[in-house]
Structure formats: C-alpha cells, structure tokens
Amino acid sequence: MLALGAVGLAAALTAAAFVAPNQAAAAARAYVPAKPTDVVATVPRRDPREVAERQALAQAPDRVELAVALARADIGRARSLSDPRYLGRAQATLGRWWALPEPPPDVLLLRATIEQSLHDFRAARVDLDRLIAIRPDDAQAHLTRAVVATVTADYPAARASCDALGHLAPPVIAEACRAPLDALAGHAADAYARLARAIDDARTDESLRLWATTTLAELAIQRGDEPLAASHLRAVLAADPSDAYARAALADVLEQERDPAAASALCAGFEQIDNLLVRRAIAEHRAHGPEADALARMMHDRIAAAADRGDRVHMREEAMFVLAVDGDATRALALATANWDVQKELADARLLAEAATAAGDRAAAAPVLAWAAATGVVDARLESALGDLR
C-alpha cells in the first residue's frame, strides 16, 4: 500500500519531465559513444529472482498474477528512486491487459496508479471509480482515489474515500488521509494534533510512522512552523536517506529559512533525480555557489531532452526553475498557470501566486484567490506569496 497510492498523500508523484506549453525547446545534442567500451549509463544490478520471474512470464504470458507482482515492484522502484522509467517498465509488463476496457481488478488498480503518477488524473479517476464499484473494500483503491480527488480539488470524493479507509486500514493511514483535507479546510492545527497522536500509536510500524511523519511535516509547514517541519523531515531522512520526497521538502524548508547553501548541500549527489536537481540548481544560484552555472546548464538540458521526447507535462518544477534562476516571470507564470489547470495542491497555489506577484499580474492569481476563499485554507507560505494580491 505504501509503495503505491499512499505516496500521493505527500505529493502526487511527479513525472520526471519538464515541458513548457507552446514551447519548442531545442533538443539536447545526442551523444554517440566513440568506442564500444564507453560507459553510457550505470544501471542497478538485476535481481536473479526477478530475472527468473520475467523469464517465467515470457513463457506463460497470460499469468496475470506474475505480471502484477513484477509491475508492482517496478512502481515501488519508481517511487523510491524518483525514476519514471520504471513506470514505463510496469506499463510494458501489463501490456497484455493494459488497453482492455475491463482488465482484471489488480491490473486496473496498477493502471490507475501509473496514470496518477503520470498526472493523467482523469483516466486514473475513471479506473478507480470502476474498481471501487467492483471491490468496495479495496483499501488501496480508496487511498489512491483520495490522492487523485484531492489533487483535482474534488474534496467530497476524497473525504468519502478517507472515511472508507477508517474501516479498511490502520488508523494512522486513515488519519493521514483525512489530515490534509482538514488542513485545506482551515483546520491545520487540529489536523496536526490528531495525526501526531496516530503516529505515536503506530510506533511499532516503522514504515507507516515514517510515511505519516512526512505528512505531519507538511502540516507544520502549513502552520508556519518551519523548524518543527525540518525536525520531522530530518527524522525521516535519518531513518531512510533514500526518501527523495522528504529530501525535497527539507530543501524547501531550508530555502524558506534563507539557508540556500544548506539546501544545495542537502541535494548534492542526488542530481539524477529531477526533483532534487531543480532544487539544488535554485539553491546554488541563490547562494552564488561555485556550481551554479553548471547546475543551471544541466537543468536546461533536462528540460530540452524532455521536450524532445514529448513527455507528458508536469510543469511545477520547471516553473520554479524559470522563476528563480532564469528570472523570466512571464514565462514562469505561463507554466504555473498551465500547471494549475492540471493539479491544485498547495504547492501549486503557492507557485502561481509567487509567479503572478513577480510578473505583476494580479488577474493571473484570481484562480488561486478563489480557491483559497472557497476552501478556507490557512497556509503561511501561501499568505506570504499572495501578499498585496489580495
């Protein structure tokens, strides 16, 4: 469960692609090895058991249970490594059933999970609604639907799935599902207190505790308590240094605390993860660090390569980079606006408000102002970003 839908409660999985709308980015120059011994990429050593399972699937391609297990493992890798290529592997593994209007339920769940991860939220919601009609007691389906519904601002549907989890999953999962919704409705302090109690009660389950602690840190950020959020995120990273989302969130906290050098150091060595590369590029730029120019070039290359591939768009990180490093408020605002049309998380609201302020375009912030008024959300960073726009 934690490897699939639950991660979306911290943030809907970001596809590692940055493609600007209506932008014909120059393609990165192709690299042609000079000799057969040149190393193009270093890849993880393959698990012999997985190799055997893939060979078994090749010999009996209708073994849906084996395909589901292999695809689930790849989705878990995509989450832990922040590498969307594993989502493609998972989709390929499920290819025999992928396009069926009524695939087996387990395939339907994984298809929706991949769709959510690639920000095809409409397709994911259709699949999840269908799955829940078939298996109303499927906790994973409800958790993933809560993620998709929250990101697309369908809060009644998200709350309905969170309520269902109260009967289907451990209490900490149900509370971590409800807490962000309560916080969006203006009750961040109460949501924090309830989730903290649920985490204390779940101390025997380390994976659940760490996952929920990341959500707890987000609630602390919303309340404006950046030091408390930093302590939560450092605890998560101490237990699991590979948690890319917690590392990115802590880098954001350090930036908010005006310590870009520390944010850059935190992300150093993780530049293969686009989410962390963009944060290190921004931090190094603000700190006037020695690698600022090199990191900016690396980000521009990633943007161009993704555009050349025609990857599905997730524009939050590109808008952040364009605003902070390129200093192009007009283009950043276009990206942030297009991103808001796709997803409506707090981070997206903050970004659109910041870009609109930088561009001096109050009208562009109208959707966020209306959303904030409708939800009743109270968020320290958003209030700061809105500033005079109100």
Image (cartoon, rainbow, N blue to C red):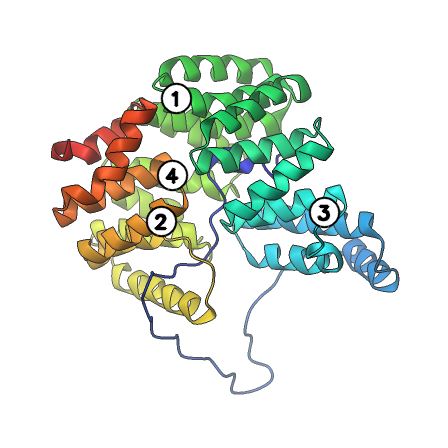
Q: Nearer the viewer, mark 2 or mark 1?
A: 2
Residue on which the image places disc 2: 339
Instruction: Check disc 3 and report the residue beneath it.
Output: 107
Residue 82 place in picture, x, y as percent: 52, 50
Q: Are marks 4 and 1 in contact (CB under 8 Å)?
A: no
Q: Identify the residue at horizontal 43%, vertical 32% (top origin).
A: 234
| Mark 4: amino acid | Lys
- Mark toward the start of the polypeptide (3 vs 4): 3
Q: Residue at x 21, y 45 (%)?
A: 364
Real-space CA distance between mark 3 and mark 4, rounded to the nearest whole angstrom: 27 Å
* Of pointers 2 and 1, the one earlier in the residue sequence: 1
CA–CA distance between discs 3 and 1? 33 Å
| Amino acid under disc 3 | Val
Whether the residues at callouts 3 and 4 have beta carbons within 8 Å, the answer is no
The residue lying toward the viewer, choosing from 295 and 221, is 221
Instruction: Please state if 108 lies on the left or on the right of 195 as rendered.
Output: right
- Camera-side residue of 330 and 87: 330
Classify 10 Å Cα crowding around label 1: few (below 14), some (14-19), many (20 and above).
many
Q: Residue tagged by mark 1?
A: 183
Q: Residue at x 74, y 55 (%)?
A: 97
Q: Residue 199, located in which quarter of the rendered image?
A: top right
Q: Are marks 2 and 1 in contact (CB under 8 Å)?
A: no
Q: The N terminus lies in which quarter of the figure?
A: top right
The reply to whether residue 379 is visible in this rendering is no
Q: Secondary structure at mark 2?
A: helix
